[in-house]
Image: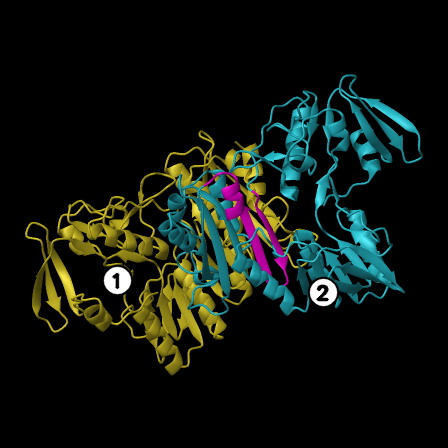
Chain colours: A cyan, B yellow
Amino acid sequence: MVVRKAEVFREKQGINLLTGHRVQRIDPDNQTVSGTTREGKDFSAPYDRLLIASGASPIVPDLPGFDLPRVMALKSLDDGRKIKNFLADTPVKTVVIMGMGYIALEMCEALAALGITVDLVKPNPRFLPWLESAMAQAVKDEIESKGVGVHAGHRVECIEKTGEGLRVVCPDLTLNADMVLVGIGVTPNSHFAESAGLNMSVKQSVAVDRRMQTSRENIYAAGDCADAYHVVTGKKTWIPLALRANRAGWAVADNLSGKNVEIDGVAGSAVFKIFDLEVARTGLNVAEAIEFGFEAVEMMITSASRAHTYPGGSKLLVNMIADKASGRLLGAQMVGREGAAQRINAAAVALHNQMTVEHFSQTDLAYAPPFGPTWDPLLIAANQLLKKM
Amino acid sequence: MVVRKAEVFREKQGINLLTGHRVQRIDPDNQTVSGTTREGKDFSAPYDRLLIASGASPIVPDLPGFDLPRVMALKSLDDGRKIKNFLADTPVKTVVIMGMGYIALEMCEALAALGITVDLVKPNPRFLPWLESAMAQAVKDEIESKGVGVHAGHRVECIEKTGEGLRVVCPDLTLNADMVLVGIGVTPNSHFAESAGLNMSVKQSVAVDRRMQTSRENIYAAGDCADAYHVVTGKKTWIPLALRANRAGWAVADNLSGKNVEIDGVAGSAVFKIFDLEVARTGLNVAEAIEFGFEAVEMMITSASRAHTYPGGSKLLVNMIADKASGRLLGAQMVGREGAAQRINAAAVALHNQMTVEHFSQTDLAYAPPFGPTWDPLLIAANQLLKKM
């Protein structure tokens, strides 16, 4: 995360940065934006070119108790500071985290490291539904082994105050907590873009082309509010992650200043650490592949993070997804104590090249006993997957 | 390494495995091989198809003292056992290792872990000459910080016996040792292939096509004795490493049994661990790129193994090599305490696809703070390299 004071933009870079100004309307025909300031005054500003970089906001359900002071969402740096300060000022022994995505799990690890008892809760009975089921189970086992409660399949109905603490109420489950964190996902801040008649895309993100231009010629959008092409499907997707947002920011800056820069799509690569496990993915999972019309097959293999002759290795699970019709590699997933995080990128690069599984299986991946078996786990998965194709 | 007893081949698989039979001649016109047995008897065997899988042998200089009992080379499992037994039976305090390649450095680490003082010596004054010089220096610093003597630029003239020990003599340097290990490289066991009139290739390896067929239709070769195509240059190369040997073994088995399997070339990917450093490479270095006629440029950057906000990160050096004329990525090298070994494979896959640096710079590599900065070190290197192109 990059943090700079507003003064730096004003004084060093000559940018008229208006903090405390909330844009509520875009008028594309008159090329103005308007809204209200923090002090409640109306304002209006003209533009030649407009960049929408309004990001995304955490989803907070409109249910009883979510406005209680000890219920917090996590997205911005400010949210993080608020949580940190609360933990410093208040004795917190138990936390319920709603959601089981990347942010929820990273928070889970951070809180557990402070000695706090954590319960995770979400309505979908499948833990990490995007991950091959045996691999998802391995991650669940790891989390539970650390004393975290994983309550998948429980829809929170309300949060109630109980003396000093809180009670998270589901139809058949009640969890007590000193604090509740809401980490059930984010939604693009795109309402004013929609009102202005801009084309919208997946999950209400703002539709942009490869130059980050919206459906209006002089309006651009970049970051978590904007969509992207998926390199595997060629279709639009919305995957609000840091690298894409950052990359789009650089490209749109070029385009706003008169250059003509196109950027590639996303592969949907992501990784997170949860306790001692690395969990990584790129491309489509088998359900997504079927949804996009591929003749999808997958192969999950168990390999090792080091050569069997080298001490200290651990299990490395690899799942690989392919299209039987074209032979193309569509995605890969990995779970292990070591060797998953950076290894996934070999598959990500393959996806950017629309490689077939057969071609990928022929790649010359580096081998040494401390880092894997002679046949890299990715190659073992590819070889096994080929037998199903 | 796969170790199976000869009886298993004979009894379980019906293979007439003749151990103790050294082939000395191939007669391609009469389709026979002949030689002598361990007991000194002549033998001859006919073939319909012949596979040469004779591997490579360590190079041992023809200089005085290299036949002394405490001078050992390392290539085969037997060599390893011999060294291990010697160390178990004999008090060894100091070892001189000739050579500074992968095997020499891995031996250096293994011996240092046993508390043995190690000196490395070789004639070339450049340590790891294939690696960008600042990166090679970083590896040298690491090795020297562990108390290992690195004597690059010293040509050994002879080894002398001194009471119980040995003395390694160079013109301006003398090193005492209880044992000397020779790790100056290997050479293909290809003499009988050459005598039989088969086409030879780089460094006297046996020339094979993508089906592992030699210049004679019914003779194949695979493993460390055979050459390969390089995916970057398209030209023949000889890089005797485990994955290629293993892959060629599978392919040639198919082709010998009547299938028609072609395999891709090698990218020259390799990795090794030396003390706390991972050193990885793929593709060409800048000198090789120039030698093969590319308009080569390189860019070395210093990045980090984790996001700067995440504790425990360390420096990660990345060097990237490209062809200015075509924009193609030609190679990459990495040195760091973590995150180099598997990360190199993203670049290796790019090489198999003849990717440009620009296209590679657009790849969606997975990011999370424990595993790297938002822009993966490979992407940072690509972005910086683009500015030079």
The secondary structure type at the circle numbered 1 is loop
Marks 1/2: CA–CA distance: 63 Å
Q: Which residues are magenta?
A: A268-294
- Horizontal and vertical percent position of residue A3: 77, 43
Pick whichever, A163 or A217, lies toward us. A163
Q: Is residue A260 visible?
A: yes
Q: Is residue B333 visible?
A: no
Nearest to the eye among marks 1 and 2: give it. Answer: 2
Pick whichever, A339 or B198, lies toward us. A339
Residue B22 occupies quadrant:
bottom left
Residue A128 in the figure: left or right of residue B158: right
Q: Which mark is residue A2?
A: none
Residue A157 in the figure: left or right of residue B90: right
Is A291 contained in the magenta span?
Answer: yes
Three-letter residue code for mark 2: Ala
Residue A229 in the figure: left or right of residue A218: left
- Horizontal and vertical percent position of residue A191: 76, 32
- Horizontal and vertical percent position of residue A277: 59, 61
The secondary structure type at the circle numbered 2 is helix
Residue A379 in the figure: left or right of residue A134: left
Q: Which mark is residue B62?
A: 1
Q: Which mark is residue A112?
A: 2
